[in-house]
Image (cartoon, grey):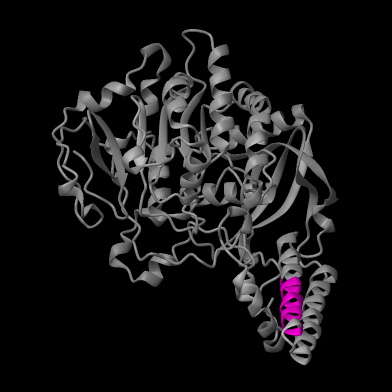
């Protein structure tokens, strides 16, 4: 919805307080296509490559250079992954014969104009249970969820527009700012200017707030909402609509910068339904959906600090569509405060949620019927995930195959020393492969290091964490968010690498976006912004 020019002008004040520092803000306006083209899929090499590790100096211009040759013998890189034959399934590291990149990604976008590359259909492949809505201009994606948040007093249907409480809050803040400006003028003797500013600014802000609060709903919604308070573990299923105009890497939401206050399913990713299910009903419905999927696999997303329930579910749907992932997307949402000022509370709640997350992950492993369970955790969500996995490892009988396939730690806000000593060994025992994405540009992790006094596992640079058996990927330089903390779903290169990791099940030496780097006697990988020559 667009405001007329007079009202739109009054909203200019709001532009100073609108940011995109967190997923909860849901503001996609800061993102622009970076001009990098989509890349062609390549077939899995039939044999392990022999290569040479390039020096840091020779790879300084790596983002524009073909992949360098390497001199480290294959066994030196593969050795960390050879944990225990009893705990490993060799087929997990192979690319299924029928696995092909979808047509939209196979196309050589470098030969197309940028407009054509951007317009590639994002719905070539949809998650299991999703439906295209024909002429409606969007697809409906089904996201299973579990949460230990407190159920909200309102339902989704009670929100008259989008449920975006931030809009009303921002307008209220703007009104307070205008009144403060008026008082400042009054104190400086500019009584007439101050009074006029207070009356006009406050009046427009109140009018806009009333318009939002009492406007008629344009999207039919139903189901429950959840607050930032602690609750009991519940399960359910959501429906999220993704527009046909969706751009990979974005969670399109209404933006005050564009004077939008209402959701539009043709333009925005919208949560339309959240229905709680009894545990048995949830397991039955999930297992039925898994059985209908082509690969019988799950993608479990665990959000991080400063994320609300709605934003977490929307991000899960976006990642599943953008990879693309044809299995079943699942979201676990713990009681983050969805506020930049809620860091300490989020820390406490990330520990409080551990037994619930452990219970839910164990249920997925034993009851879902999935042959492959992939877990992606972000930021502070990695604290809960790694602790839960550690407890699962303690209870895992000897000789039993790992219950999880890929475990991905994106920007983990976890103590690096504790991860190396205690957590990484447990993760390697309960999964077929562990991948850690780190960045030197991550301002949130830099701030966390200052608070805690020790490096975080998600940092790169001089503190990059390289652990035997864990594939560490340095993604410095590709972040697009204000805090450099949401690259796991915001960047085309990152999504491509996640695709090759989760769907093609390729180890780092066989993935097309990675360049090998050396840290002492260990190897880690750098994510390039364009495809490199595949290793042969």
Count of numbered badges drawn on the protein: 0
Spot occupied by residue 412 in the image (x, y as percentages of width and height): 49, 38
- The N terminus sits in image quarter: bottom right
- Name the outermost residue toward the top: 398
The residue range painted magenta reads 174-186
**In the image, is 98 to the left or to the right of 391?**
left
- The C terminus sits in image quarter: top left
Q: Is residue 279 above or below residue 201?
A: above
Spot occupied by residue 151 in the image (x, y as percentages of width and height): 81, 42
Q: Is residue 177 magenta?
A: yes
Q: Is residue 182 above or below residue 108?
A: below
Residue 249 visible in the picture: yes
**In the image, is 48 to the left or to the right of 462?**
left
Spot occupied by residue 70 in the image (x, y as percentages of width and height): 16, 37
Spot occupied by residue 34 in the image (x, y as percentages of width and height): 38, 64
Q: Closer to the camera, 248 or 407?
A: 407
Q: Is residue 110 magenta?
A: no
Q: Quadrant of residue 103?
A: bottom left
Q: Is residue 206 above or below residue 341?
A: below
Q: Residue at x 30, y 51 (%)?
A: 528
Tell me the chief SS of the magenta region: helix
Q: Closer to the camera, 184 or 122?
A: 184
Residue 326 visible in the picture: no
Q: Residue at x 52, y 56 (%)?
A: 123
Q: Is residue 193 above or below residue 365?
A: below
**In the image, is 519 to the left or to the right of 454?**
left
Q: Residue at x 35, y 25 (%)?
A: 469
């Amino acid at each position: 919805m667009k405001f007329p020019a007079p009202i739109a002008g009054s909203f200019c004040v709001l532009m100073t307080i609108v940011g995109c520092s967190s997923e909860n803000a849901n503001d996609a306006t800061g993102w622009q296509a970076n001009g990098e083209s989509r890349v062609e899929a390549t077939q899995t090499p039939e044999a392990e490559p022999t290569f040479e590790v390039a020096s840091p100096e020779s790879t300084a211009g790596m983002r524009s250079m073909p992949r360098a040759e390497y001199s480290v013998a294959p066994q030196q890189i593969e050795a960390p992954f050879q944990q225990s034959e009893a705990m490993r399934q060799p087929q997990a590291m192979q690319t299924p014969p029928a696995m092909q990149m979808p047509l939209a990604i196979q196309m050589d976008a470098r030969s197309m104009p940028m407009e054509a590359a951007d317009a590639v259909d994002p719905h070539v492949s949809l998650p299991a249970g999703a439906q295209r809505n024909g002429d409606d201009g969007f697809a409906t994606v089904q996201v299973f969820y579990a949460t230990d948040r407190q159920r909200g007093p309102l339902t989704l249907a009670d929100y008259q527009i989008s449920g975006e409480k931030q809009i009303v809050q921002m307008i209220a803040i703007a009104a307070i700012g205008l009144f403060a400006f008026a008082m400042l003028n009054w104190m400086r003797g500019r009584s007439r200017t101050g009074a006029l500013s207070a009356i006009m600014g406050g009046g427009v802000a109140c009018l806009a707030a009333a318009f939002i609060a009492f406007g008629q709903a344009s999207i039919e919604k139903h189901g429950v909402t959840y607050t930032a308070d602690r609750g009991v573990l519940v399960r359910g299923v959501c429906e999220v609509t993704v527009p046909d105009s969706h751009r990979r890497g974005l969670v399109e939401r209404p933006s005050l910068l564009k004077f939008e206050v209402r959701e539009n399913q043709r333009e925005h990713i919208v949560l339309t339904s959240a229905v709680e299910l009894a545990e048995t009903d949830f397991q039955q419905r999930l297992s039925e959906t898994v059985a209908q999927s082509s690969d019988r696999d799950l993608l479990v997303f665990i959000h991080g600090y400063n994320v609300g329930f709605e934003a977490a579910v929307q991000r899960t749907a976006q990642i599943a569509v953008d990879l693309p992932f044809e299995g079943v997307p699942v979201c676990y949402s713990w009681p983050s405060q969805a506020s930049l000022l809620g860091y300490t509370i989020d820390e406490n709640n990330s520990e409080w949620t551990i037994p619930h997350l452990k219970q839910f992950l164990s249920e997925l492993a034993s009851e879902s019927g999935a042959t492959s369970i992939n877990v992606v955790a972000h930021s502070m969500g990695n604290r809960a995930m790694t602790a839960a996995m550690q407890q699962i490892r303690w209870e895992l009988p000897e000789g039993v195959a790992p219950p999880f396939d890929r475990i991905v730690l994106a920007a983990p806000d976890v103590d690096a020393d504790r991860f190396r000593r205690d957590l990484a060994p447990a993760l390697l025992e309960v999964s077929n492969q562990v991948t850690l994405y780190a960045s030197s540009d991550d301002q949130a992790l830099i701030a966390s290091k200052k608070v805690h006094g020790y490096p975080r596992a998600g940092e790169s640079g001089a503190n990059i964490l390289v652990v035997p058996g864990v594939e560490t990927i340095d993604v410095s330089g590709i972040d697009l968010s204000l805090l450099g903390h949401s690259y796991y779903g915001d960047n085309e290169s990152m999504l491509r690498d996640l695709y090759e990791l989760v769907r093609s099940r390729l180890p780092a030496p066989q993935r097309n976006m990675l360049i090998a780097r050396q840290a002492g006697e260990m190897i880690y990988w750098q994510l390039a912004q364009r495809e490199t020559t595949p290793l042969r």
